[in-house]
Image (cartoon, coloured by chain):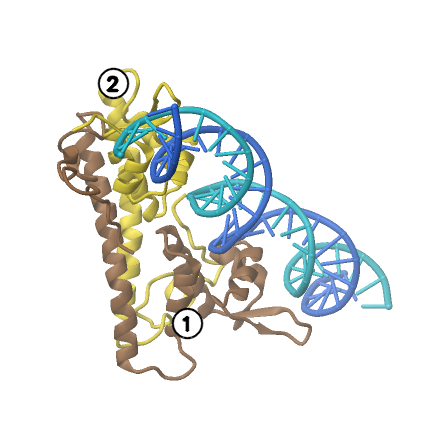
Chain colours: A yellow, B brown, C cyan, D blue
Amino acid sequence: MQEALTIGQLSARSGVAQSALRYYERLGLIRAERTSGNQRRYHRSELRRVAFIRIAQQVGISLEEIRTALDSLPAARTPTAEDWAELSTAWRARLDEKIRLLSRLRDDLDACIGCGCLSLRRCTLYNPEDNLGGEGPGARLVLPG
Amino acid sequence: MQEALTIGQLSARSGVAQSALRYYERLGLIRAERTSGNQRRYHRSELRRVAFIRIAQQVGISLEEIRTALDSLPAARTPTAEDWAELSTAWRARLDEKIRLLSRLRDDLDACIGCGCLSLRRCTLYNPEDNLGGEGPGARLVLPG
DNA sequence: CCTTGATTTGAACCTCGCTTCAACTTGCAG
DNA sequence: CTGCAAGTTGAAGCGAGGTTCAAATCAAGG
């Protein structure tokens, strides 16, 4: 079993187009060695990075945010334990929030079976019956940063 | 309490730019009445739609998919109970899948505290140690459609 | 009526996340 | 060594999801 993957192999295994892999490299999301003839050779661990990228993307996280996270993870120089904890904690909060949003969306949709519309009293997606709207500029939808 | 909202009011309350609201209307995601002078007037229920749109967007669902869902929900003509069930069930599966992906991402990140990188044996984001790669074109990352 | 702020339109422009293309080079099998 | 698939680059193009702009009209208070 050879150590390094060509771009074609990485593409085949990850299901990500070669053009996308080159794009990720330009953005600093993945890395590659070069052969004497300037062709890319990927370490197998890049497979994991690519999988991570795609999964994060699927749930609405931008490449820039993903890059920031990946930058910190397999650091060039040994990071402190606090570094890890800090990064992971930050992401954890964001992921928890997204999970919460998704669950709410799912449950509200479920509640709508049998009622038929989003304006049902039970539907709590926003501000049911707009009853916070009585004063000032009105109730606001506050989505997490 | 007045019945209809101007675009400025809907924007202020939803936190969504007026230009985005007009864009959503062009895509058929929300609807507005018009005054005699051609200005938009929104029913309060549109607040709920906008909130739904933003939440769904946050978790990586495209406007086209959201439109499809919203199209079916508050239908012009009374939909059957089976219609609702079908739609909600379809979304439920997709939402469940996204929740699963997010949880995996979160848990894998958590596991990496104390280890420090994505190539740890414990990290199961993709195909640990690439041990499915021995035959044929190799293991593939299969993300849900 | 006048003024001022809110709203209207279409067209142009923007960022993100890629794909496509052209022209050229590498790597490997025979 | 030949031949051909696979890989290289930069530049251009594309679709999604909007924003910005200009020039005009509308709505509401004084």
Q: Quadrant of the C terminus of chain B?
A: bottom left
Secondary structure category for the residue under label 2:
loop
Front-most of residues A29 and D8: D8
Secondary structure category for the residue under label 1:
helix
- In the depicted structure, whether residue C8 falls above or below residue A60: below
Q: Check disc 1 and report the residue beneath it.
A: B71
The x, y position of residue B58, in whole percent, is: 38, 51
The quadrant holding residue C3 is: bottom right
The quadrant holding residue A4 is: top left
Horizontally, residue B34 falls left or right of residue A77, namely right
The residue sitting at 67% across, 76% down in the picture is B36
Kind of residue at disc 2: Thr
- In the depicted structure, whether residue B93 falls above or below residue B135: below
Q: Label 2 is found on which chain of the structure?
A: A
The residue sitting at 13% across, 31% down in the picture is B121
Kind of residue at disc 1: Asp
Horizontally, residue A7 falls left or right of residue A133, namely left
Q: Check disc 2 and report the residue beneath it.
A: A80
* Dot 1 and dot 2 residues touching (CB under 8 Å): no
From the image, state whether disc 1 or disc 2 is nearer to you. Answer: 1
Front-most of residues B74 and B28: B28
The quadrant holding residue A27 is: top left
Horizontally, residue B103 falls left or right of residue A141, namely left
The residue sitting at 20% across, 41% down in the picture is B138
Residue A83 in sight in this render: yes
